[in-house]
Each structure stands twice: as structure tokens, then as C-alpha cells.
Amino acid sequence: MTERVRVYTVSEANAALPRLNVIMERQMDVLKRIDETSEAMRQRGADPQYIEAAPTDAGEVAELKSRLRDLLGEFREGWREVETMGAVVKDSRLGLIDFYGRRGGALVWLCWKYGEPAVSHWHPLDQGFAARKPLERDSIPPTLN
């Protein structure tokens, strides 16, 4: 790993959750609006994969494309905000966020999913969500014990 990354303790990752929850709530709302706008485009015979304006677009389709472009920009900006915290977005639809952490001196992912009350799992860097394991009881905040 050549660039420096922020390495979180479990306590630091949990301290970031109030801010992350606000961002994630906003992101999930934007995602819902993206899905609704994409569906509205499909219902009008337009493919939501093509969001650049075309001279042949009907007024309503052109407006939906513009709205979708704006929403996608807002969605990307929200994830940039998460990344500036030093967290890593693993699945934007499910709200999976990992933090670099240490376990026994080795670099690992501290794993959190939107809706969970705390960071209470980890997994190796080369594995994903399916490989997560619970943190030891003494590393979990007292509210989860």
C-alpha cells in the first residue's frame, strides 16, 4: 500500500457513525429518487443509461435526464464525503462501509452496514462482507454487550 490511509480504532469508527448515519440517510433518499427517475424514464421509452441530452428527446424525457444527471452528481458527492472521512464505500446500494483497522497488528477492514448500531464486525482486506466476523466482546461498546 503506497498511499497513507487513516487507520481507525473501533472506538473511532463508532464515533464517526452519527455523521455517517446522516450522510447515509441522505444517500438512501437520493438513491430512491434515482430509482424513481430511472423508472419514469423507462415508462416513457427512454433508457436511463443514456442521460446526455439528445435533440430528439421529448420535453419530459429531457427533464428526466437532467434530473437524473443532477441526482447522480449528488450521489457521487455524498460518497466523496464518506471517503474524506477515511471510510471506504463497499456497496452504495446496501450502505456497506469499511474502515481500515488493525487486529493483532494486521491491517483489516472494520465493517459496518447502514442500520447497524455500531461497528461490531471485521474481515480481512482480501475478503468481503460474507467473511465478516464479530469483534471481541471487550472491543464492542457497552451498549451492545
Image: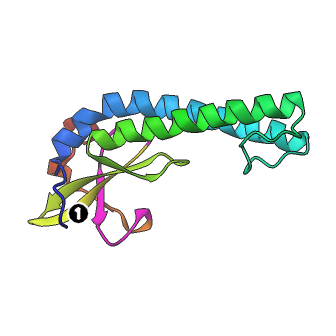
Is 117 part of what is drawn in magenta? yes
Query: Where is residue 142 drawn, in percent x and y?
Result: 20, 37
Residue type (three-letter) at the residue carrying disc 1: Val
- State the residue in front, 14 or 88: 88
Q: As displayed, is residue 34 above or below residue 93?
A: above
Is 60 part of what is drawn in magenta? no
Query: Where is residue 2 drawn, in percent x and y?
Result: 17, 65
Q: As displayed, is residue 36 above or below residue 42?
A: above
Tag 1 residue: 108
Query: Where is residue 15 drawn, in percent x and y?
Result: 22, 33
Q: As displayed, is residue 130 above or below residue 48?
A: below
Mark 1 packing: few (<14 Cα in 10 Å), some, or many (20+)? many
Q: Quadrant of the N terminus?
A: bottom left
Identify the secondary structure beneath mark 1: strand
* Residue 63 relative to residue 21: left or right: right
* Residue 130 relative to residue 65: left or right: left
Let me know if residue 17 appears in the view.
yes
| Quarter of the view holding residue 141 | top left
| Quarter of the view holding residue 81 | top left
